[in-house]
Image: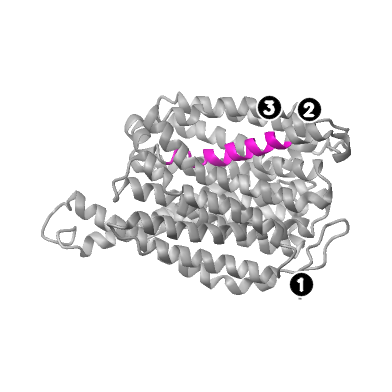
Amino acid sequence: MSIEAGELTRSDRRLATWGLMIATAMQAADALIANVALPQLERDLGGGVQLGAWVITSYLCATAVMAPMTGWLRRRYGARRLFSGTVGAFIIASLLCALAPSAAAMIVFRVLQGAGAGVIAPLAQAILLDIYPRERHGRMLAIWGAVLMVGSVLGPPLGGIITDLVSWRGAFMINLPFGLIVIALLRPLRYRAEISDDRAIDGISVLLLMIAVGALQLCLGRGVGRSWLGSPELLGEGAATILAFTALVFRAQRSRFSVFRPEIFKDVNFAVAACYTFLAAGILFVVVVFLPSLGQGPLGYSATLAGFTIVPRAVLMTLTILVAGRLVRRLDHRILLGAGWLLTACGLALLSNIEPPRELAWIIIGSSVQAVGAGLLFTLHMTLAFSTLAPELRTDASGLYSLLRQVGFASGVALMTAVLRLEVDAHLAVLPGGTGGPALLPSAHLIDLATLHAYRDCFRMMAVTSLIVIPGIFLFRIGGGEKGAEPIVSPP
């Protein structure tokens, strides 16, 4: 089924838009809403820090696997049926997470929850482009992007409040009322029949995608600080990642239908924007994950206060994304992209100077500056990615774009968490009284000090990376595009 903009009344379109926005924010928040609840969750279910990492990455990996299949699922089941079904599945999986009796059950239920969430974001984006005329696409993408980012950054404070007032289980129960509201708001949508597509999706490609994403996360999470030559496990995981992705690309070129359409990458703007989105998403998500953990860890904040340390960045990022949506046609994209990466680097550099007793001010200022840069990048990357794509490729491109964003999220968290552990050990080895000193076991104070220094090192590494990638912004091509696409025209 497809949706025609002219078939909806103004009231129906407004209700559907609210439903799509709420669903987008809900699935984005759930990637992190349990983050500040991890200490309680780990104590109740066991598993330690490793369980916390799996709770986050299992959700992101499942989301990444399902996202590129959105186009095929829509053609097979129809937009409203698919969207309502995935929201319903997301609600059920959330309730199962809230009732999880063990660590293993929690990981399984998070995978199911992520599978439902993986379809929600790209399908919501595609439906928005369907129900609004072309001249309003830029504005709606900016609003949708703001909602997506706000959901991500408001997840931790919301999770902190619920965890302090109820328990970590309440952080998952909150999805029930919001999910039911979404299903009700989408009911007014009217549809016309699409051209049927009876081609079955390639199951082997789906399996290859699962292997590639899973092996990548294991490789990133365990590879930092270990010798690759002396670790058959790491060599195997790295080889599995490369071989699975390579086989997936070749199979997509030869199969009648795989999990994605290779021709999407023939669009230069989409290909470049996808690569930049992968990197920017990783940096953004690491900051959102690290700041609450830093607050609850070495800084000793409560769950609520740790979650609220990133509220200012949520407000600034929302405003920046909305403003950037209006600036994209008025200023040269190179100016906006360059400013975005410079602000991101400056914000991360400020975060690398966090030092008590003024650590809260450093956190708010640094994360706010970084959020402004991230807001510019998010809007520009998404707008450029879809600016020259043919309309019939939108849904498939949305799924693939979401896949790369989610893999960027998960890869960034896995890689930088591993770097963080390595840096903590390195600082403990040189601190007086640490593992390299006379004491056999470091004190809690020394562990907190080493952890604080490790977080600062991680922020510094990401700041340097943000500066290094700036020259690549000249790869974007502005002013041309595919037939039927909506090119962006920047001033010379």
Q: Name the amino acid, label 1.
A: Pro
Mark closest to the chain's N terminus, 1 or 3? 3
Q: Is residue 422 above or below residue 146?
A: below
| Residue 178 horizontal/vertical position (percent) | 59, 29
Locate residue 366 relative to residue 471 in the image: left or right.
Answer: left
Q: Is residue 436 above or below residue 157?
A: below
Q: Nearer the viewer, residue 318 or 26?
A: 318
Q: Nearer the viewer, residue 453 or 133?
A: 133
Mark closest to the chain's N terminus, 2 or 3? 3
What secondary structure is found at the residue carrying circle 3?
Answer: helix
Q: Is residue 314 above or below residue 29?
A: below
User: Which residue has dot 2 on it?
Assistant: 188
Q: Is residue 351 magenta?
A: no
Q: Are marks 2 and 3 in contact (CB under 8 Å)?
A: no
Mark closest to the chain's N terminus, 1 or 2? 2
User: Which residue has dot 3 on it?
Assistant: 183
Whole-angstrom CA distance, mark 1 to mark 2, is 41 Å
Residue drawn 69% across and 68% down? Answer: 333
Q: Are marks 1 and 2 in contact (CB under 8 Å)?
A: no
Question: For the magenta stretch, what is the residue range?
Answer: 17-35
